[in-house]
Image (spheres, rainbow, N blue to C red):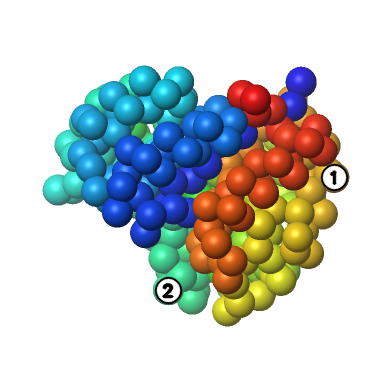
Amino acid sequence: MPAPIALQLYTLRDQLARNFKNVVTRVAEMGYVGVEPAGFPGTTPDEASNLFADLGLEVCSIHAQLPLGKRKNEVIELAKELEVRRVISSTPREAFATVDGVKALCDRWNQAHEIAVEHDLELGLHNHYWEFAQVEGQSGFDLLVANLDPGIFFQVDTYWVNTGGGDSVSVLEKLGERAPLLHIKDGPLDPELDMTAIGSGKMDFPPIVQASQGTAEWLIVELDRCATDMLEAVHHSYRYLVNQGLARGAR
């Protein structure tokens, strides 16, 4: 059975800021099974949580800061409030200037992982394209895999993998069960250009989904920016993935 489809709500951040309830309701009506919040424009976590429950939307994971330092309690409390175990964060581009910089980054992530485990949470890393550049002759992504605690999972952003010169299929085959969440986006594979609705860009999704069968628990649509109407792009993305049998919707 295909993995269920969710939407990273950052995709609709501008629309949500104007009317959070109406926009999330439209997402549910499209047939999305779940959502992945990254902030709560125009609402509060408590109000959002109640709305998701009323609409039957599962919160598959959240994007937040690492649970470290002053942000530790904030992140932990947010996860508990939304009744979600998986907390996702990402890496700064400047950390990939040197091997020592990547290793220092991994040390920080490993500390955050220990805190997450103490609070019955799972910590995941969402990649961008810069992790796939060479760092002193080594792959930045390979350095992450080698130096991060094995308990840290990866939310593989398949578009950014390919944009950075990597190959999503190979990455997913290498990570296996360590990649339970996939970000799905499409476009020209150029970090400076706008993305497109899923199925209308350069990404080839069938082999990516095939490589993740049995390990990917969610396919999560995310468009950072798009030249067309974003709500229509979100709906088109749903229809493409579900109609092609690549993801499972609620409709």
Which residue bears the numbered disc 2?
Answer: 94
Q: Is residue 78 left or right of residue 243?
A: left
**x 57%, y 36%: residue:** 30
Q: Position of residue 133 (x, y in %)?
A: 63, 71
Q: Is residue 191 above or below residue 78?
A: below
**x 24%, y 48%: residue:** 42
Q: Is residue 98 left or right of residue 251?
A: left
Q: Nearer the viewer, residue 234 or 87?
A: 234
**x 41%, y 65%: residue:** 92
Q: Furthest residue to the bottom?
A: 192
Q: Position of residue 182 (x, y in %)?
A: 62, 42
Which residue bears the numbered disc 1?
Answer: 207
| Distance between the alpha carbons at the discs numbered 1 and 2 | 32 Å
- Is label 2 in a helix, a strand or a loop? helix
Residue flagged by tag 2: what amino acid is it? Glu
Q: Is residue 192 above or below residue 151?
A: below
Residue neighbourhood size for the residue with mark 1, other residues' Cα within 10 Å, grouped as few (<14), some (14–19), many (≥20): few
Q: Nearer the viewer, residue 199 or 98?
A: 199
Q: Nearer the viewer, residue 198 or 98?
A: 198
Q: Is residue 147 left or right of residue 110?
A: right
Image quarter where the C terminus lies is top right
